[in-house]
């Protein structure tokens, strides 16, 4: 089956400083793929280059068969890529309900789209907190809200940058549960997270990036069996 997302030869810069040196990456329909690497290796830059927050200087990005490299972020969002950014970036002065409904849209023309009721059923905690402002939420609630907000746009592909960073173990488990359910529902996912042990359990395939280059790619079973890779590239 043709990939949902296909990134090829991606090169991105911050001014004169090159951060990506020919990144290749693909995600199939319904696949959960991770991008792993130590801090500062180019994970967020790859994500930014995919979603239109940083214009790649070379390379191609194809989403559902169409070239999107260099398109504006809002256009890429409308095409059906949903991003849960590092730091969540929810609106602090809007309520949970307002955060969820602000950009709601059925971008994938889903027969059974995400609605407020569905998001509340998925994250009961958000329903309980629906009248609270974004800045009154705990880190875990903010992450649930950031995910719920993107689900309300009914994306084809969901990208999470630092999916469980800084969250308590219990909340982390809640986020993993939700990501497993989303994959089971057929959504394609690109995850960035440091918890390799959990990722080899729940994801299909992995890419390891080092200094802007993909150094390794393979299945969960391949990565699970090579803990030397974890030490070498991930510092685990
Ligand atoms: P982290 O887990 O720390 O977010 P990362 O793998 O996502 O790490 P990036 O944020 O993509 O790494 O950074 C890749 C490289 O680009 C690093 O050398 C970083 O210093 C540099 N970089 C990132 N953002 C900028 C920026 N806004 N301006 C200049 N250089 C940047």
Image: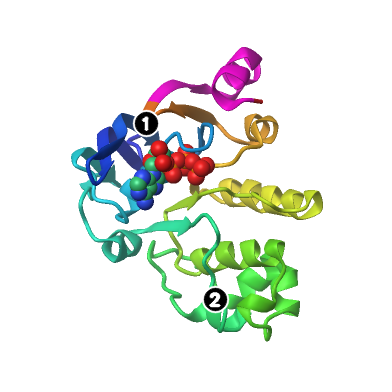
Q: Between disc 1 and disc 2, whose residue precedes?
A: 2
Q: Quadrant of residue 236?
A: top right
Q: Where the N terminus falls, by quadrant?
A: top left
Q: How are the colours assigned in the image?
A: rainbow
Task: Choose top left, top right, bottom left or bottom right for residue 92.
Answer: bottom right
Q: Is residue 191 left or right of residue 121?
A: left
Identify which residue is drawn at 62% across, 77% down.
Answer: 134
Relative to 4, say whether 86 is above or below. below
Residue 100 point in image, percent of width and height: 54, 76
Numbered range of the magenta stretch: 214-235
| Residue 112 visible within the image | no
Residue 226: image location, x then y, percent: 62, 14
Q: Is residue 224 highlighted in magenta?
A: yes
Distance in Å between CA atoms under marks 1 and 2: 34 Å
User: Residue 215: horizontal and vertical position, in percent?
Assistant: 42, 20
Residue at which label 2 appears: 100
Kindly identify which numbered label has been placed on residue 212: 1
């Amino acid at each position: 089956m043709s990939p949902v997302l296909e990134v090829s030869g991606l090169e991105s810069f911050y001014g004169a400083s090159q951060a990506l040196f020919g990144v290749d990456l693909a995600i199939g329909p319904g696949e959960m793929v991770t991008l792993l690497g130590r801090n500062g290796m180019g994970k967020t830059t790859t994500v930014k280059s995919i979603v239109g927050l940083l214009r790649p200087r070379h390379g191609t990005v194809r989403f559902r068969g169409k070239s999107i490299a260099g398109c504006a972020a809002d256009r890429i969002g409308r095409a059906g890529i949903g991003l849960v950014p590092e730091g969540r970036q929810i609106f602090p002065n809007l309520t949970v309900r307002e955060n969820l409904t602000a950009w709601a849209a059925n971008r994938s023309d889903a027969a059974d789209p995400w609605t407020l009721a569905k998001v509340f059923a998925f994250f009961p905690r958000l329903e309980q907190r629906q009248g609270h402002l974004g800045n009154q939420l705990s880190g875990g609630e903010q992450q649930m809200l950031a995910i719920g907000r993107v689900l309300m746009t009914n994306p084809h592909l969901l990208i999470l940058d630092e999916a469980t960073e800084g969250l308590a173990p219990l909340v982390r488990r809640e986020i993993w549960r939700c990501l497993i359910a989303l994959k089971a529902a057929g959504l394609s996912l690109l995850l960035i997270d440091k918890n390799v042990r959990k990722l080899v359990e729940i994801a299909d395939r992995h890419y390891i990036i080092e200094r802007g280059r993909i150094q390794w790619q393979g299945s969960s079973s391949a990565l699970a069996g090579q803990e030397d890779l974890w030490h070498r590239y991930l510092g685990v």
